Amino acid sequence: MKTNFLAGIILAIVAAGCGPAPSGLKQTGLGSIGGNKGLPSGPNGPTGPAYTDKYELAVIKDGADDACVYTVPAGWSKEGTLKWIAAGVPYPLISAVTYSPDRTKSMGWVPMLSFKWDKGPTGEQGVHFSGGVDVINWLFSQNKDVSNLQIVDQQVQPAQSQIPGGIVQNSTQKAEVASVRATWTEKGVEKEGLIVCKIDLSDMNFEYGQSQFSTVSLLMYASPKGQLMNPEFVRWATMFFKSLQIPPSYARKIGQAAFDASQENRKIALQQNDDIMKRYWDQQKSNERGADQFDQYIRGVTEQSGPDGQKYVVPNNGQNWVGPGGQIINSTDPNYDPNNDPNGGGGNWSQLSG
């Protein structure tokens, strides 16, 4: 696997301009995001104006199979990709990326990348990493449009390795999760982002050299500087990351071992992402309302059913509605009904339950 290809996939998450969505990605349309009135109840009382968030379904296809299903804020792009990689046991490299209509905000997820490094009498080949922060620095260094990267906050914690130990004599395994909040300049725009990297390392020593095999799971989101922790953006990012699902039927196709490892990496990275966001809000004591909204929403998502029994991953706060194309509306306004909303994309919405 070529490292410039991998860097291109990840850096697309923070890039300001990419091409159109691949033709293999199914899309649905819906109107603009809006609808604010009333006051929802939070753990500490009213938390500000009620919100109505609208989401669209995105499906990454592998031939006739649904390889990855997720939701994005209505009107945002759907630029997920899938590429089969031969790395010992072949598996598909899936990346789910979405951009705001003006392309200033972005979110992305890659469940598993693999890297190989060798050092011997003939020199070095590949990329060698010491940990998750090293991966993040390396990825940003590959983008010529990015400069002045500054790490504002970083948290590194040990994690469970998904690489079996003892496969190679004299090998050692290590795993960690690095959570980084950073600022940078991109094409003249001051940006900031949160990047969470789960890395598994297997280092091997031989008589005539060394080798390292590593797998990486990444999630990342970015915005213009000063907008990253806007409560609205936090809700959208939480829904995007926690709605990502690899259907079980596709998991069986790609092999249970690869699926289990990618899902475990994603789960660990998501938990670490929640933790660093919570810590960041705790530091912003002057914005108590925003902190309350985040505390209320970060509880996560839930699974609810439509009238036909179809299951949907949705926010666990407020009411959830599903449209004929799989679109989702989440509203904390108890009086909101998308069937009566002229900006709701038309009638025929059903309220989810469960």
Image (cartoon, rainbow, N blue to C red):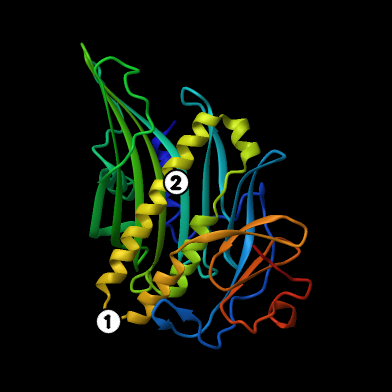
How many callouts does the rendering have? Answer: 2
Q: Is residue 170 left or right of residue 17?
A: left
Which quadrant is home to the C terminus? bottom right
Give the residue type at disc 2. Arg
Which quadrant is home to the N terminus? top left
Answer few, some or many: residues within 10 Å of disc 1's Cα (few below 14, many 20 plus, some between 14 and 19): few
| Above-or-below relation of 332 to 156 | below
| Above-or-below relation of 193 to 198 | below
Q: Is residue 26 left or right of residue 295?
A: right
Q: Pinpoint residue 167: horizontal percent, then vertical percent.
A: 35, 18
Closest to the observer, 321 or 204: 321
Q: Pinpoint residue 233: horizontal percent, then vertical percent.
A: 45, 70
Q: What's the CA distance linking mark 2 and mark 1? A: 32 Å
Q: Which residue is mark 2?
A: 266
Q: Which residue in the rendered view is the most extreme toward the bottom?
A: 38
Of mark 2 and mark 1, the one earlier in the sequence is 2
Q: Which residue is mark 1?
A: 286
Q: Residue at x 54, y 66 (%)?
A: 316
| Above-or-below relation of 170 to 315 | above
Q: Residue at x 57, y 54 (%)?
A: 79
Q: Pinpoint residue 110: horizontal percent, then vertical percent.
A: 46, 46
Helix, strand or loop status at disc 2: helix
The image quadrant that residue 191 belongs to is bottom left
The image quadrant that residue 171 belongs to is top left
Give the residue type at disc 1. Ser
Helix, strand or loop status at disc 1: loop
| Residue 77 shows in the view | no
Residue 1: give its label: none
